[in-house]
Each structure stands twice: as C-alpha cells, then as structure tokens.
Image: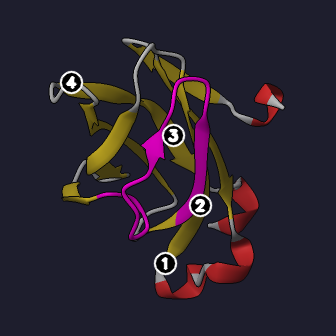
Amino acid sequence: MKELFQHAAVTDGITVRVAVNFLPEQSRVEAGKWFWVYHIRIENHGTQPVRLMTRHWRITDGHGAVNLVEGEGVVGEQPLLQPGQSHDYVSGCPLATPHGSMEGHYTFERADGSDLRAAIPFFPLAAPATAG
C-alpha cells in the first residue's frame, strides 16, 4: 500500500506519508480557485506510544505567498499511536493559484512526557495544464 503515497519523511521512528491529488470537481478555475485533497498516514515505528498534539503547516501558493496554519491535532483528533500502529486522515487545501506546495511538522508527546517534532514532507500542489 505504500506505493499510494508519493512523499514520505522519517523522524525518530515516526514516518509521515502523503498522497496528494488535484480535485477538479471541487475547483473553480474560472473564479481562481484550485483545490487539492491530501491523504496522510502517520506510522509509529518507535518503541513507545506517541500522541499527536499539534500540527504546523507552511502552505505556499504559486506567487510565493505563505500561509502558516497551526492548531491542535488533525481533523479534530489527537490520536494516540502505540508502537507499530498508524493513523490515516484526509484533508484538503484550496489555493488561488494552480501551483503551490505544502510542508510542515507535527508535535507529538511521548509516553515519557518528552516532545517529538516529526517532519511532514514537502509536497507540490500542481493542477494539470488543462485546469488553468
């Protein structure tokens, strides 16, 4: 199943995988709105449980404008991942340009109380040439 994910980053036993797709049916190119959906899989290959506490995204559009997004958990959840477990979620990103990128990190709390900052890999957002 890993071939579904085009991008991955590994930090201290946490693997973050990303699959991204342009959604023409959610986009309104004539109105300058492009939309992508991304599927994230977080895998705990470490030796202790981790809880995802916060997310930190850097979203850049085709003009170089940066939008920083920070918040608790992901899609309203702060999942606890035991060693060997994974967590999947799907979210979306609108842009005012047909190209851009996303990257960032998650902050986890380990069972021993220490924090772990796990990288979210850089991934491009690119609409097909026929969409804009």
Amino acid type, mark 2: Val
Residue 124 disc label = 3
> Nearer the observer, disc 1 or disc 4?
4
Q: Which residues are magenta?
A: 73-91
Which residue corresponds to mark 4? 112
Mark found first going from the N terminus, 2 or 1: 1
Question: Mark 1 touching mark 3, by CB under 8 A?
Answer: no
Which residue corresponds to mark 1? 33
Which quadrant, please, contains the C terminus?
bottom right
Label 4 element class: loop
Counting other residues with Cα less than 10 Å from the Cα at mark 4, is it few (<14), some (14-19), or many (20 or more)? few
> Nearer the observer, disc 4 or disc 3?
4
Q: Nearer the viewer, residue 120 or 62?
A: 120
Q: Nearer the viewer, residue 5 or 117?
A: 117
Mark found first going from the N terminus, 2 or 4: 2
Mark found first going from the N terminus, 4 or 3: 4
What percent of the width, then of the height, locates residue 91?
Answer: 53, 64
Label 3 element class: strand
What percent of the width, then of the height, locates residue 41?
Answer: 60, 40
Residue at x 47% of width, y 79% of height: 32
In three-dimensional space, the C-alpha distance between marks 1 and 4, rounded to whole angstroms, equals 44 Å
Amino acid type, mark 4: Asp
Q: Nearer the viewer, residue 79 or 60?
A: 79
In three-dimensional space, the C-alpha distance between marks 4 and 3, rounded to whole angstroms, equals 35 Å
